[in-house]
Amino acid sequence: MTEQRPKKLTAATVVRTERPTPHLIRLVLGGAELTGLPVGAYTDHYVKFVFPPAGVRYPHPTDLATIKREFPAQQWPRLRAYTVRAWDAAAGELTVDVVHHGDEGLAGPWAAGLRPGDEVLFTGPGGAYAPDPTADWHLLAGDESALPAIAAALERLPAGAPAKVYVEVDGPADELPLASAGAVELRWLHRAGRPVGEPLVEALRALEFPAGRVHAFVHGEATAVKELRRLLRVERGVPRGDLSISGYWRRGMDDEGWRSTKAAWNAQVEAEESAVAAA
């Protein structure tokens, strides 16, 4: 993913919150600073919410570079990236879905405590993917973390465009209505206590690929995505330019830990794929 604008801090106000599923909190944000927000080119647009340490306030307007230059390291913010679910330019409302698993993590409990009128800070948006209307068919797959981007991509598909969609969630209560003009074959994969990513990998390994060029979007837990990268890039021969694939998160790591190791992880995966392809 690549940032679309300087990493300045944008202030927004919570307009309302919703609970579309037991493990999803929907934040609808508004405010004057959202006017002209550059959202729309991609279906995986994302913002990074900014979490200052307790008791620390930053001047506004400002940006991350200024904060890191003028504040000691212990006062730098933590960041959490979330995909933009929708942007209503006419209403000036940005919708972001946050996965919530009780008191676990940073952003989930924070989102659960937000009320209308509360201020939030974020950087972005960034983004890199939108469905290619010239592809013969589309593959969209991921866990809850990828669901907002998958939903947005489905809404962007041309009428009748074939798409195979696999979404892994905890159980039936986590399913959401997904709208599309495309010819969509949707499968909800329920973990029901199985390890995260296992049902998704199993389903994609069993998939019979239709004829023609696929444009694929596959994101979620890093260990599962690693297996799926090898499946798609090496075993199925999907060209790099036709595949958006990345680990949004990794089991056993917080976001800072994952981001600090992600480049090395990706380099290792690339090397392993190259070795297998050359064998």
Image: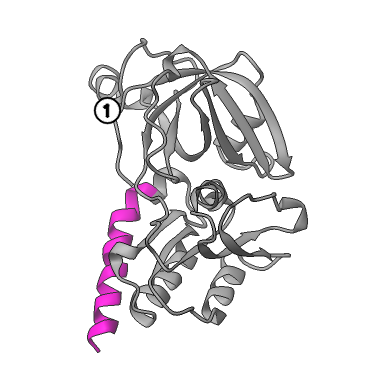
Which residue is most to the right? Answer: 173
The question of residue 242 being in magenta is answered with no
Helix, strand or loop at label 1? It is loop
Using the image as rendered, state which of residue 168 and residue 212 is in the foreground. Answer: 212
Which of the colour schemes (rainbow, by chain, secondary structure, one colour) is used?
one colour
Which residue is more in the foreground, 259 or 92? 92
Q: Is residue 267 magenta?
A: yes
**Kind of residue sitting beneath label 1:** Pro
- In the rendered view of the protein, which quadrant contains the C terminus? bottom left
Instruction: Give the prevailing secondary structure in the magenta stretch.
Output: helix
Going by the image, does 199 lie left or right of 11?
right
What residue is rendered at 59% in x and 16% in y?
118
* 36 relative position to 177: left or right: left
Residue 218 pos. (x, y %) = 46, 61
Bounds of the magenta segment: 259-279
Q: Total of numbered circles in the picture?
A: 1
Q: Residue at image x 54%, y 50%?
A: 145
Residue 107, percent from left and from top:
55, 35
Quadrant for residue 233, please give it: bottom left
Pick out the residue farthest to the front.
Answer: 159
As drawn, 123 above or below 267: above
Image: 197 above or below 111? below
Residue sitting at 55 percent across and 35 percent down? 96
146 lies left or right of 273: right
Q: Residues within 10 Å of mark 1 (few under 14, many from 20)?
A: few
- Position of residue 8 relative to residue 139, above or below, is above
Question: Residue at label 1?
Answer: 6
Location of residue 227 in the rendering, given as x and y in whole percent from the top left corner? 44, 72
Residue at left offset 58%, top offset 70%: 198
Front residue (pair 41, 47)? 41
